[in-house]
Structure formats: structure tokens, C-alpha cells
Image (cartoon, rainbow, N blue to C red):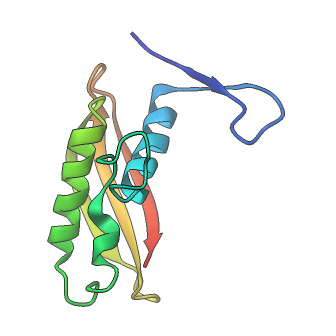
């Protein structure tokens, strides 16, 4: 069963988005939301921003683990194979999160990368 999302998405006309596009939007929402920010569900989100002040001393593997756990909890439509975090060589306060995953329903594999600045 393939679901589609219909909405304006920053356009004057309705746009139909695929499962992958909707999942990527939700992954971004999960990663960028701090638990307690979503009034409807205070547990929703990822503890990523807890690393802001300790970013220089934290292991990238710890960040990867936090992101993997949040995705496993809040996005059941995907199977995550890996989460890789790399630091931008020109800006040490910026990281790139690369998620290798597949749709649980069809096993279609795809990647999603999101830049995050601390």
C-alpha cells in the first residue's frame, strides 16, 4: 500500500509527494525537534541539540546512536542500515548526517543527507 501526501508545500497549487519524500520530511522533523518542543507529544524528537555545548568533546558515534534511536522510535516506515555523521572540514560547527535506509514495505533502498549547524 503506497501512500501519497497532498498539500501546498510552499506552492500555490497542491502537490502530491511520494512515500520517500514524506519520509525524508518526517526524518528531518524528527532529527531537528528536541523532545519537549512538540506540545502534542512531549517525547517526540531527537536529543541531538543536547550536544551543542559539548560538540568538541563528544564522539560522532554517540551522535549517530542518538539519531538511530530516534529514527527507530519515530519513523517505523523505514529500515535503517547506517547513520554516518561527518564534520564539515571548513566549519567545525557543522555536521552532515547521512542515513542509508530502505522503505520497510517495498525494501526500496535510498539515502538521505541533512546538514546541521550547531
| Res 74 → quadrant | top left
Name the residue rendered at 22%, 68% in the picture.
63
- Depth check: give the residue in front, 37 or 68: 37
Residue at the image point whose x is 27% and y is 45% from the top: 71
Seen at 49% across and 34% down, the residue is 22
Residue 45 in picture, x, y percent from top left? 34, 51
**65 or 50: nearer the eye?**
50
Residue projecting furthest to the top: 1
| Image: 29 above or below 6 | below
Q: Is residue 77 visible?
A: yes
Q: Is residue 75 left or right of residue 116?
A: left
The number of numbered badges drawn on the structure is: 0
Q: Quadrant of residue 41?
A: top left
Up-down relation of residue 29 to residue 116 (above or below): above
Quarter of the rendering containing residue 84:
bottom left
Q: Residue 81: image x %, image y %? A: 19, 45
Q: Is any part of residue 82 visible from this angle?
A: no
Q: If the image is split into quadrants, where does the N terminus sit?
A: top left
Of residues 92 and 67, the one drawn nearer to the viewer in this rendering: 67
- Residue 115 position in % (x across, y down): 46, 66
Q: Which residue is found at the position 28% from the left and 68% from the top?
A: 85
Amino acid at each position: 500500500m503506497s501512500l501519497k501526501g497532498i498539500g501546498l508545500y510552499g506552492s500555490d497549487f497542491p502537490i502530491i509527494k511520494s512515500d520517500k519524500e514524506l519520509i525524508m520530511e518526517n526524518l528531518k522533523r524528527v532529527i531537528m525537534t528536541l523532545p519537549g518542543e512538540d506540545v502534542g507529544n512531549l517525547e517526540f524528537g531527537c536529543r541531538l541539540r543536547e550536544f551543542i555545548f559539548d560538540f568538541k568533546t563528544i564522539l560522532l558515534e554517540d551522535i549517530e546512536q542518538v539519531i538511530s534511536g530516534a529514527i527507530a522510535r519515530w519513523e517505523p516506515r523505514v529500515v535503517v542500515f547506517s547513520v554516518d555523521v561527518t564534520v564539515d572540514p571548513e566549519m567545525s560547527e557543522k555536521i552532515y548526517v547521512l542515513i542509508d535506509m530502505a522503505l520497510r514495505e517495498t525494501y526500496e533502498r535510498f539515502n538521505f543527507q541533512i546538514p546541521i549547524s550547531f
